[in-house]
Image (cartoon, grey):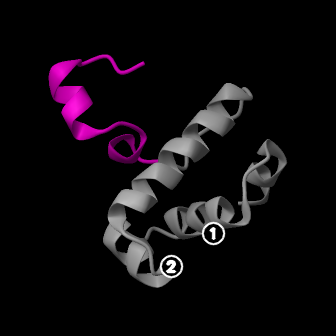
Amino acid sequence: YEYYSKFGLGARELQVIKLVIAGLSNNQISERLFISTTTLRTHLKNIYNKVKGSGGSVEFLPFERKYDVSQIKNNPSPS
């Protein structure tokens, strides 16, 4: 969790990472943070872009959280 604090993530994004690492599902995280799953997906996308764009590892994110499922179906090699 502390590894990700150096990538310029906001407080909410760090909360999301902490819960993802703890193994909570998207629904559980959304309920705990009082946000919609759409907002959670936006946070996950922003986290991924900030960390990956800075050369960091996003291994904490399971594959299905890194990429929208519809993108995978239409484009098997996500960018």
**N-terminal-most mark, 2 or 1:** 1
Give the residue number, with chain letter if any, for mark 1: 15
Q: Secondary structure at mark 1?
A: helix
Q: Residue at x 72, y 66 (%)?
A: 11
Residue 34 position by quadrant: bottom left
78 in the magenta segment: yes
Residue range corresponding to the magenta coloring: 61-79
Q: Residues within 10 Å of mark 1 (few under 14, many from 20)?
A: some
Q: Are marks 2 and 1 in contact (CB under 8 Å)?
A: yes
Give the residue number, with chain letter if any, for mark 2: 33
Residue 77 x/y as whole percent: 31, 16
Residue 22 x/y as whole percent: 53, 70
Q: Secondary structure at mark 2?
A: helix
Mark 2 → mark 1, Cα distance in angstroms: 8 Å
Using the image, determine if residue 13 lies above or below residue 49: below
20 in the magenta segment: no
Residue at the farthest right position: 6
Q: Residue at x 35, y 58 (%)?
A: 38
